[in-house]
Image (tube, grey):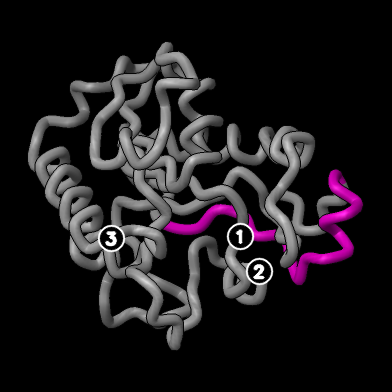
Amino acid sequence: MDEECRNCPALCETRTQVVHGYGDVGADFLFVGERPTAKADEVGVPFLTDEDDDSGTSLRRILERLALCDSTSPDDRPALENAYLTNLTRCRDPDRRPTDEEIGNCEPYLNADIRSINPEVLVPVGERALAELGTEYTTTPVDELTLPEAHATTIRGRGFALVPMVEPREQTDDQTQAWLEHFAQLMASDYRQTKGRRER
């Protein structure tokens, strides 16, 4: 992974660092967001949020409740087990979301993450991640892949199951509980049968 990537000149000017994937490289569950958070841009670990941000829940809290993250691990270096975190884009502009071109420029990094981790389940976090992963890995028409409708559901894909999630900070308590219950049921099932084995 290129720590000095210059594929998106505008983002090179606004980022603190390139934020590549992080977590258990043998994970069954790969979580994909849209872009690094402000804290992730500062620290270099996807999905990090400020500890004093009380708005909504965080992905870390969700992972802790599923025993995919050690609750005693440092805030800036979560100890993940069976989970890997990444984004559609690796760099952050603090004032805007990534363009389609920037997502396209980062696609080789995302593809490399998916190929090397070879997960069983992809978790698109947010609308943009669902649209991108849904287009690439399912036969479901993209206009049918919307949130919150697809939140806490399993979409059978080409090689993967997708379990979409509304952005954690935007979830209601009921949405968080629904997603946790759905994902816990998936984890307790023989979810590996949902995936057609691919040659690496």
Could you tell me which residue is drawn at 70 percent across and 39 percent down? 103
Residue 54 in magenta?
Answer: no
Q: Earlier in the sequence, mark 1 or mark 3?
A: 1
Q: Give the magenta-colored segment's residue range.
A: 7-23
Q: Which amino acid, by three-letter code, is at mark 1? A: Pro
Check whether the beta carbons of the residues at disc 2 and disc 1 lie within 8 A of each other.
yes
* Badge 2: residue crowd in 10 Å (few <14, some 14–19, many ≥20): many
- Ranked by sequence position, the earlier of labels 2 and 1 is 1
On the rendered structure, is 141 left or right of 183?
A: right
- In the image, is residue 83 above or below residue 160? below
Callout 2: SS: helix
- Chain-order first, disc 2 or disc 3: 2
The reply to whether discs 1 and 3 touch (Cβ–Cβ < 8 Å) is: no
Write down the residue under mark 2.
Answer: 41
Residue 50: x and y, percent?
49, 81
- 102 and 77: which is toward the camera: 102
Q: Tell whether 29 sits left or right of 67.
A: right
Report which residue position mark 3 lands on: 172
Task: Identify the element where label 1 is drawn.
Answer: loop
Disc on res. 36? 1
Q: Is residue 74 above or below residue 19?
A: below
Give the CA distance from mark 2 to mark 1: 6 Å
The Cα–Cα distance between marks 1 and 3, rounded to whole angstroms, is 22 Å
Residue at left offset 8%, top offset 42%: 188
Q: Position of residue 134 (x, y in %)?
A: 46, 25
* Disc 2 residue type (three-letter): Asp
Extreme-bottom residue of the structure:
52
